[in-house]
């Protein structure tokens, strides 16, 4: 497993500094901007991603006799076996310096057989409804660690019988299991990619529809 570079802790006055728990990695992830946080949510909640690491590597290079360094923002390993790096930027209209750095990063990744993705804020936030829904799901999954296996099985069994069902209907049919347990189990199943939902199109609520994968 690749390890995160040791980063100097930014001032507590920096409102964008975050330490978040990753259920996927079972460790604390350090993020230094809102863009890094939003990207983290998408990566953490992507069931096709097996593992990842923030601030994974610093590339050193020389231009006109002067030494420079450039950081890649995230290392990602997918379940299909592919491995790559992500570089984040606020906008696609990068300066010549940033474009040069991206070229160096892309060439480095190609030389070592890694995929390379230059990802902008627009790429990450192009579906704000979906992103906000994933933030809620990851928040619950991160804090509610003791998911009960029988709850998961009960939900999956009911979904085998119903083509489509809302969370509220699920709670009613699985009474007396408490609402919080059903909600947490549903979020866990969505997070793991075990069931499908309409969270890409409508805000997450008790009316959210669920169906089999």
Image: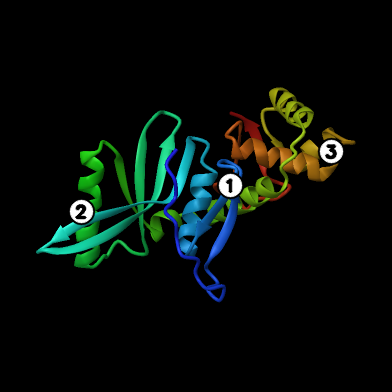
Say which quarter of the image contains residue 144: top right
Closer to the N terminus: mark 1 or mark 3? 1
Q: Which residue is mark 3?
A: 172
Work out whether residue 112 or residue 100 is closer to the camera in this orientation and state it: 112
Q: Report x, y in % for residue 23.
A: 61, 43
Between label 2 and label 3, give the one nearer the viewer.
2
Q: Which residue is mark 1?
A: 27
Marks 1 and 3, how far apart at CA = 35 Å
Q: Which residue is mark 2?
A: 103
Q: Looking at the image, which residue is at 20% across and 53% down?
A: 103
Answer yes or no: do the residues labelled 1 and 3 have beta carbons within 8 Å?
no
Work out whether residue 146 or residue 212 is closer to the camera in this orientation and state it: 146
Marks 2 and 3, how far apart at CA = 55 Å
Quadrant of the frame with the C terminus: top right
Quadrant of the frame with the N terminus: top left
Answer yes or no: do the residues labelled 1 and 2 have beta carbons within 8 Å?
no
Mark carried by residue 43: none
Q: Is residue 166 visible?
A: no
Task: Rate crowding at label 2 as few (under 14), some (14 to 19) or many (20 or more) other CA atoms within 10 Å.
Answer: few
Task: Rate crowding at label 1 as few (under 14), some (14 to 19) or many (20 or more) other CA atoms within 10 Å.
Answer: few
Between label 1 and label 3, give the one nearer the viewer.
1
């Amino acid at each position: 497993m690749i390890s995160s570079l040791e980063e100097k802790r930014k001032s507590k006055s920096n409102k964008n500094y975050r330490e978040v728990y990753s259920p996927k990695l079972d460790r604390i992830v350090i993020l230094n901007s809102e863009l890094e946080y939003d990207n983290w949510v998408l990566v953490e909640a992507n069931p096709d991603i097996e593992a990842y690491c923030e601030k994974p590597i610093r590339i050193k290079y020389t231009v006109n006799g002067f030494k420079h360094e450039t950081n890649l923002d995230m290392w990602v390993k997918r379940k299909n076996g592919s491995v790559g790096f992500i570089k984040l930027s606020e906008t696609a209209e990068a300066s010549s310096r940033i474009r040069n750095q991206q070229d160096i990063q892309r060439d480095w990744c190609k030389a070592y057989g890694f995929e390379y993705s230059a990802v902008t804020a627009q790429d990450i936030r192009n579906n704000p409804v979906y992103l906000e829904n994933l933030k809620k799901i990851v928040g619950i999954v991160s804090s509610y660690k003791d998911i009960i296996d029988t709850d998961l099985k009960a939900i999956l069994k009911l979904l085998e019988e119903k083509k489509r069902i809302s969370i509220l209907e699920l709670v009613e049919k699985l009474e007396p299991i408490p609402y919080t347990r059903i909600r947490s189990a549903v979020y866990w199943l969505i997070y793991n990619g075990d069931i499908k939902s309409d969270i890409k199109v409508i805000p997450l609520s008790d009316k959210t529809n669920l169906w089999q994968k």
